[in-house]
Image (cartoon, grey):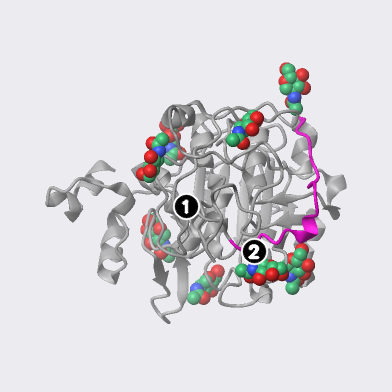
Amino acid sequence: MRSAVLSLPLLAVGAVAQAENLYTATATSAVYAAQATAKTLSNTSNVKGKAFDRFVVVWLENTDYDMAHGDENLNWLAKQGITLSGYHAVTHPSEPNYVAAIGGDYFGMQNDDFNQIAKNVSTVIDLLEDKGISWAEYQEDMPFSGFSGKAWVNQKNGKNDYVRKHNPAVIHNSAASQIDRLASMKNLTMFYEDLKNDALPQWMFITPNMTSDAHDSDIQTAGTWTRSFLEPLLNDKKFMKNTLVLVTFDENETYSIQNRILGILLGDAVPKELAGTTDSNFYNHYSEIATVEANWDLHTLGRFDVGANVFQLVADKTGDQIRTWSGELSQRYFNFSYAGVFNSHGGNRRYPAPNLSSCGGKTHNRTILPAIKELWKGSTAPVYYTPKLEIPDGLNPPSGFAPVV
Ligand SMILES: *[C@@H]1O[C@H](CO)[C@@H](O)[C@H](O)[C@H]1NC(C)=O
Ligand SMILES: *[C@@H]1O[C@H](CO)[C@@H](O)[C@H](O)[C@H]1NC(C)=O
Ligand SMILES: *[C@@H]1O[C@H](CO)[C@@H](O)[C@H](O)[C@H]1NC(C)=O
Ligand SMILES: *[C@@H]1O[C@H](CO)[C@@H](O)[C@H](O)[C@H]1NC(C)=O
Ligand SMILES: *[C@@H]1O[C@H](CO)[C@@H](O)[C@H](O)[C@H]1NC(C)=O
Ligand SMILES: *[C@@H]1O[C@H](CO)[C@@H](O)[C@H](O)[C@H]1NC(C)=O
Ligand SMILES: *[C@@H]1O[C@H](CO)[C@@H](O)[C@H](O)[C@H]1NC(C)=O
Ligand SMILES: *[C@@H]1O[C@H](CO)[C@@H](O)[C@H](O)[C@H]1NC(C)=O
């Protein structure tokens, strides 16, 4: 492992190794050189959860709720599990939604740029590792584990394949600055390798390529891909180990309407009697973090994860309270970003601090990760995270973070 890393030219010229920039080169020769040496890690663990022992997320792209719900293959999948009809994205375009799903905020991002989130911003990965729960990402057609460049195209036809903006972990320097974490950001070839070896982790985030996920194609293509990927796994004992699968989308397509997307929960962790049912509670991408926290009794990030609803079937086992959105939800569009560090229109560019005294109130009893408390203690940065379900959007920004439009 170490020798592979030390042989890189960056170190040969005496520069300080910055793991987060180690694998950003996109020239074909650089990619193939790194592919030959980059480390791949397949951590496993077996920590019992209250409602599931494995969580698998599959993200598709840019499709309005009705279009997704109407797709024949997604509909087939929905019949095997629970349809989430009140699931919302948090903004447009893609990248901030991916970021939010593991970090608990998008820090004003309103673009799909080569963004790097500061190392002192923690993610669900820190929470999982804190409890010894193994994790990995599987990004279809990523050329090698830990590749951090902006994109990689199909070498035969030049079409888009892998894009950094759909890889939430690599955008966070808290993950991209550690070799073992880079080594856990893998491609789908490695998924099948890990499956064969019975070496899949307990938490995984799966991103199909730009054709498979509907971005450069259509919902029929993505529906077909998703069913052909998942259907064999539904009966695979190496995959189904009290597993909860969430299939969802980053955002819906039409910017002028509310950003509601389809969510489907599947797997052997879904009780049989719930197959074919609909759960219409309000969820958003922060629910992905909150659900995992509740299931394994993790600490929190002290950001929007704290107030998010936990998926009902999990909340039923953890005692979390599900709340309804107070106020007029139909007037909340979640269709553009408030200001923040990554907002290229300007405005307030400070990182907000996590809410160090955050607690779940009557909803749950989880507390912030001690390491996050340590990192941010004494910070004078603004705090805008409350334990409430209601989150801001571009039209209803946090105080001091009005967007420049
Ligand atoms: C997937 O990643 C592995 C590990 O880095 C690499 O060896 C392999 O070539 C990659 N597969 C594809 C299809 O790019
Ligand atoms: C995307 O993945 C599918 C299979 O999952 C593959 O057929 C296709 O060649 C890949 N890339 C592109 C650009 O379509
Ligand atoms: C892998 O597992 C080891 C041993 O449990 C742990 O210390 C390490 O944090 C894990 N790393 C990742 C990236 O999961
Ligand atoms: C968000 O949706 C509202 C309501 O349809 C619309 O007025 C506004 O222009 C949209 N904003 C963007 C950036 O699309
Ligand atoms: C996007 O979400 C809105 C609100 O939930 C929904 O009414 C709309 O149908 C979705 N877009 C389309 C065109 O389906
Ligand atoms: C931080 O969380 C606490 C406890 O949940 C809450 O009472 C407080 O209002 C929050 N702080 C801010 C600035 O929202
Ligand atoms: C939080 O802990 C208290 C004291 O142990 C307990 O009474 C309460 O039910 C817990 N609340 C939840 C939502 O788990
Ligand atoms: C976190 O990192 C950002 C960016 O480097 C910096 O501006 C901020 O002061 C840091 N906060 C703390 C508490 O270290």
Reply yes or no: does residue 326 show up in magenta: yes
Q: Position of residue 181 (x, y in %)?
A: 41, 44
Query: At 57% across and 45% down in the image, what residue appears?
Result: 104
Reply yes or no: does residue 145 show up in magenta: no
- For residue 50, which quarter of the picture? top right
Q: Nearer the viewer, residue 44 or 12?
A: 12
Residue range in magenta is 319-336
Q: Are marks 1 and 2 in contact (CB under 8 Å)?
A: no
**Residue tagged 1:** 348
Residue at the extreme bottom: 157
In the image, what residue type sits under mark 2? Asn
Question: Does the rendering let one see residue 73?
Answer: no
Q: Nearer the viewer, residue 206 or 61?
A: 61
Q: Marks 1/2: CA distance?
A: 19 Å
Figure quadrant, ligand 6: top right
Query: At 42% across and 45% down in the image, what residue appears?
Result: 175
Q: Is residue 218 above or below residue 15?
A: below
Query: At 75% across and 33% down in the image, what residue appears?
Result: 320
Query: At 67% across and 36% down in the image, what residue appears?
Result: 387
Circle 2 residues within 10 Å: few <14, some 14–19, many ≥20 = many
